[in-house]
Image (cartoon, rainbow, N blue to C red):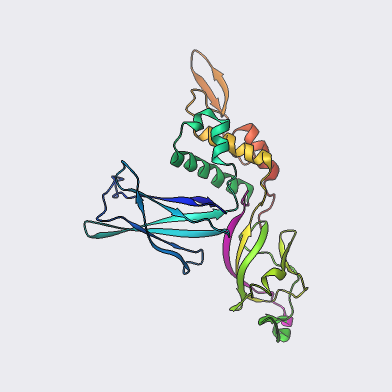
């Protein structure tokens, strides 16, 4: 699930057996939320609230978050003395690509859906847009760990000093972060096990043309890096938002003539579909035109 910055979000539990049949727990389930590093516990053993009239369904409200991250909310339930663990991924994003209220306002068929169904369709659309574009269309959090090996003798010769406790030596002026497209902000990190100072180091890291640079011109040396960053588009373009709305409406479509129908023959009820291709990722022309326009030509 996705949760937008600055607002509470509802985390849901459907407690079922392996066949999908709802179960009644011995007591109200609890949820523990950990940060994207997998170790930091943000909320411990919070009691869920039963959904009225539904068996095995519980909710808990995640407080408003201030930083993009990929949280894990783990529900703990006990049924007949047997413990059940149900993890839920919570992707804290800058904003939804299109707001649910806008979907209900623009599309009559979506206004009839309940909240959980509508959010599920929006989630599918946002996932597809991220895959096609090659970067998150709205800000997302990422935690990355990797080795930088520049393979030069200069690294071995000149890594001797420190800046704010960090190793300082010979290296490159720009850093590309693996799996991070369009970096926007660095929250935290470390170099060779030495943590970045949140007041002295982190504010000195700037973004230039998709790469990270130090504002004081120090180089990025060889070593082991960990970074927690926000990446993506802080203000998604309006036409991308509209395209997302159209696609959510397509996913909810129950029309006799699907959106991807390119030709309809009456009497025989023959329908030709516009099939998705690399140049037409959804098969819906007005949506594909927007996606292809913003898609990254090369994903590093």
The answer to whether residue 225 of the structure is visible from this angle is no
Instruction: Name the residue: 45% across, 39% down.
Output: 117
| Residue nearest the observer in this picture, 160 or 276 | 160
| Residue nearest the observer in this picture, 121 or 64 | 64
* Magenta residue check for 89: no
Whole-percent x, y for residue 18 in the image: 30, 50
* In the depicted structure, whether residue 237 falls above or below residue 73: above
Which region shows up in magenta? 135-154
Whole-percent x, y for residue 126 in the image: 56, 45
The answer to whether residue 113 of the structure is visible from this angle is yes
Q: Which quadrant of the view contains residue 289?
A: top right
* In the depicted structure, whether residue 261 falls above or below residue 166: above
Whole-percent x, y for residue 168 in the image: 71, 81
Name the image quarter holding the C terminus.
bottom right
| Residue nearest the observer in this picture, 295 or 36 | 36
On screen, residue 34 versus residue 287, left or right, reads left
* In the depicted structure, whether residue 207 falls above or below residue 24: below
């Amino acid at each position: 699930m996705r949760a937008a910055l600055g607002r509470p979000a509802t985390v849901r539990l459907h407690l079922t057996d392996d066949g999908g049949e709802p179960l009644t727990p011995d007591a109200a389930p609890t949820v523990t939320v950990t940060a994207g590093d997998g170790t930091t516990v943000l909320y411990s053993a919070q009691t869920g609230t039963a959904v009225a009239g539904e068996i095995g369904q519980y909710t808990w409200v995640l407080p408003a978050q201030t930083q993009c991250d990929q949280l894990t909310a783990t529900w703990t339930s006990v049924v007949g003395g047997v413990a059940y663990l149900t993890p839920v991924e919570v992707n804290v994003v800058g904003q939804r690509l299109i707001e649910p209220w806008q979907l209900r306002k623009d599309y009559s068929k979506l206004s009839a859906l309940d909240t959980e169904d509508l959010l599920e369709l929006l989630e599918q659309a946002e996932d597809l847009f991220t895959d096609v574009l090659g970067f998150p269309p709205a800000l997302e959090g990422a935690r990355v760990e990797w080795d930088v090996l520049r393979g030069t003798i200069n690294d071995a010769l000149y890594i001797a000093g420190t800046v704010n406790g960090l190793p300082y030596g010979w290296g490159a002026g720009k850093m590309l972060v693996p799996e991070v497209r369009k970096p926007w902000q660095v929250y935290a990190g470390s170099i060779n096990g030495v943590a970045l100072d949140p007041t002295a180091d982190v504010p000195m890291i700037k973004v230039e043309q998709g790469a990270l640079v130090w504002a004081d011109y120090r180089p990025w040396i060889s070593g082991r890096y960990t970074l927690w960053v926000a990446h993506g588009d802080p203000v998604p373009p309006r036409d991308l938002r509209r395209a997302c709305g159209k696609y959510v409406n397509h996913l909810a479509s129950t029309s006799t003539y699907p959106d991807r129908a390119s030709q309809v023959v009456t009497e025989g009820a023959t329908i030709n579909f516009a099939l998705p291709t690399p140049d037409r990722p959804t098969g819906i022309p007005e949506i594909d035109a927007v996606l292809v326009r913003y898609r990254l030509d090369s994903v590093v």
